[in-house]
Image: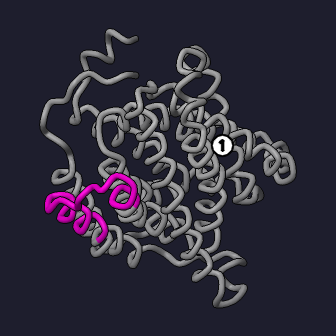
Amino acid sequence: MSAVLERVNGPAWGAFFVLGASVLWGTTGTAATFAPAVSPLAIGAAAMGLGGILQALSAARPIVDFSAPLRGQWPLVAVGAAAVAAYPLAFYTSMHLAGVALGTVVSIGSAPLASAVIERITDNRKFTRRWMLGALLGLAGAGLLCLAGDRPAGPDAAAGSWAVPLGIALGLAAGATYALYSWAAHRLIGCGVSSRAAMGTVFGLGGLLLMPVLAVTGGPLLGSWQNFAVGAYMALVPMFAGYVLFGCGLARVRASTATSLSLVETVVAAALAVLVVGERLPASGWLGAGLVLGSLFVLTPRRPGGTVKT
């Protein structure tokens, strides 16, 4: 395993891993539509909670090996775990209230800006021209996808004018917490902790924090095989496998670059909405998808990197 990872070092591979994770994450909104009876809190707790615990179990050996530096960085671990627990509750509720397209775009689209601000405050990182150009292209594309997306047609959309604004506010909270746990994990890796140990610890503790929410809200997941299959898919594929890839990416690129590259999730979500759910995407939506893909070309690092711990 380590021999294979040594051959795929460098920022370009880091970008590739983040893009792979983003493709998997882009399936979550469509997957959730196959379990309409399950609340967004239950979906989020099952996906991120069980997926996080699986990450911790799969990384048990690295966590033990790096237990001393992890204990030394316990405030960073605690901040990351709290952000992991808060993110899925805000993200899936945002999609439930504001619609899959709008909730995804606001959540993922706001994360690069939040990540850059966090790095600026904590690490004194400057905003490079290349990053600003790529982020602007990506945010413009995400905005077009947002405007092109359908508004929610369910009971929450008709409940009053508060639903969409509240969904947008929760999307902004999701973007901030996504940026925060990405920064915390990247910082742990920078302190010498392996990516598997850092991600396994942060996501494992975050997953444990989500277990009470799952215990209270997760009954409908056992109500049918379809609901159970959706929950299992969300935990195993986008969350477990996706965040393993994301951790490998964070070991090779900055957190702000990783969150910017993850804008591709909005394109995948929109494409699946058209192909699977049957939604229609107007020309402006396809233009937005093109701008997001263009931003990936700008943001993807091209310089070779050094050896990283995985």
Q: Report the front residue among 77 and 170.
A: 77
Task: Indicate the quadrant containing the N terminus: top left, top right, bottom left or bottom right.
Answer: top left
Q: Report the front residue among 205 and 298.
A: 205
67 horizontally vs 101: left or right: right
Bounds of the magenta span? 118-139
Asked whether residue 36 is drawn in magenta, I would say no
Task: Indicate the quadrant containing the C terminus: top left, top right, bottom left or bottom right.
Answer: top left
Q: Report the front residue among 158 and 143.
A: 143
Up-down: is 120 above or below 233? below
- Inspect this view and state whether residue 230 appears: no
195 horizontally vs 64: left or right: left
Up-down: is 18 above or below 36? above
Residue located 55% across and 50% down the image: 28
Which secondary structure class fits the magenta region best? helix
Q: Position of residue 192 (x, y in %)?
A: 41, 26
Up-down: is 64 above or below 183? above
Asked whether residue 137 is drawn in magenta, I would say yes
Q: Position of residue 29 (x, y in %)?
A: 55, 56
Residue located 34% across and 35% down the image: 17
* Residue holding disc 1: 206
